[in-house]
């Protein structure tokens, strides 16, 4: 089901990807030209959620709302668990699936998480998220990220960094929160695929 949604995201994102263009802050992404493998990692250490001072404040508020509506049901804890689990089970897979699908086959570069065969790692650091909503009327998710590529054998050798924060807005606003946020990572993947086509031929 998630893969089907990812493909639908590619179709919509190929028509319009909203947000800023990817721009280089330092380095040269053309180092990826000729590479067959690219590892990718994701970070959320300094993430902020729209409308809240901290991520902790956001989680506590959403847990409190759920427990008030369904006392003793454990809905608050389930929300907290899924908020963190979705990063590995939804956002990362949707980014990787979309990027691998969108990169032209002639490029022959495979993107995968924590790939030991790759020389370089792409790190996607999420700085801010607006989860959006879908309650009869809708708003898509927006994210702000920082991207960098470094040599896996020598992580201090950062070969390319994007200007940040880079804001991406999803084209779609599905009902489920995790898919709605995942749509923004799908849009990021599409935008990155276009950048790679131009800069890392």
Image (cartoon, rainbow, N blue to C red):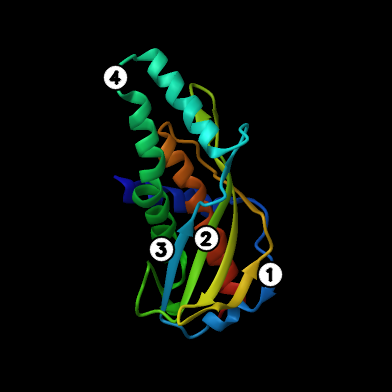
Measured in 3D between alpha carbons, the distance from the residue under mark 3 to the one under mark 2, in whole angstroms, is 18 Å
Q: Nearer the viewer, residue 40 or 184?
A: 40
Residue 24, label in figure: 1
Secondary-structure class at tag 4: loop
Q: Judge the density around disc 2: few (<14), some (14-19), many (≥20) Cα neighbours within 10 Å.
A: some
User: Left of 169 or right of it: where is 117?
Assistant: left
Cβ atoms at labels 3 and 4 below 8 Å apart:
no
Query: Which residue does the numbered mark 4 point to in the structure image?
Result: 73
Q: State whether residue 128 is above or below residue 59.
A: below
Cβ atoms at labels 2 and 1 below 8 Å apart:
no
Residue drawn at (53%, 24%) of the image: 137
Cβ atoms at labels 3 and 1 below 8 Å apart:
no
Query: Which residue does the numbered mark 2 point to in the structure image?
Result: 124
- Of tags 2 and 1, the one toward the viewer is 2
Residue drawn at (50%, 25%) of the image: 61
Q: Judge the density around disc 1: few (<14), some (14-19), many (≥20) Cα neighbours within 10 Å.
A: some
Secondary-structure class at tag 1: strand
Query: Which residue does the numbered mark 3 point to in the structure image?
Result: 101
Residue drawn at (45%, 49%) of the image: 9
Q: State whether residue 5 is above or below residue 197.
A: above
Determine which quarter of the picture holds residue 78. Answer: top left
Determine which quarter of the picture holds residue 158. Answer: bottom right
């Amino acid at each position: 089901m998630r893969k089907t949604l990812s493909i639908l995201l590619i179709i919509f994102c190929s028509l319009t990807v909203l947000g800023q263009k990817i721009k280089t802050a330092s380095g040269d992404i053309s180092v990826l030209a000729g590479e067959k493998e690219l590892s990718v990692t994701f970070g959320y250490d300094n993430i902020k959620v729209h409308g809240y001072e901290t991520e902790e404040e956001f989680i506590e508020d959403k847990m409190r709302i759920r427990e008030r509506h369904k006392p003793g049901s454990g809905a608050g804890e389930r929300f907290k668990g899924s908020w963190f689990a979705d990063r590995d089970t939804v956002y990362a897979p949707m980014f990787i699936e979309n990027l691998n699908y969108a990169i032209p086959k002639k490029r022959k570069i495979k993107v995968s998480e924590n790939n030991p065969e790759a020389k370089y790692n792409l790190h996607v650091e999420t700085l801010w998220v607006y989860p959006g909503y879908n309650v009869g009327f809708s708003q898509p998710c927006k994210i702000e990220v920082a991207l960098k590529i470094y040599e896996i054998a020598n992580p201090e050798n950062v070969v390319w960094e994007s200007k940040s924060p880079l804001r991406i807005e999803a084209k779609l606003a599905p009902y489920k929160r995790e898919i709605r946020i995942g749509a923004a990572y799908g849009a990021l993947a599409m935008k990155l695929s276009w950048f790679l086509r131009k800069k890392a031929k």
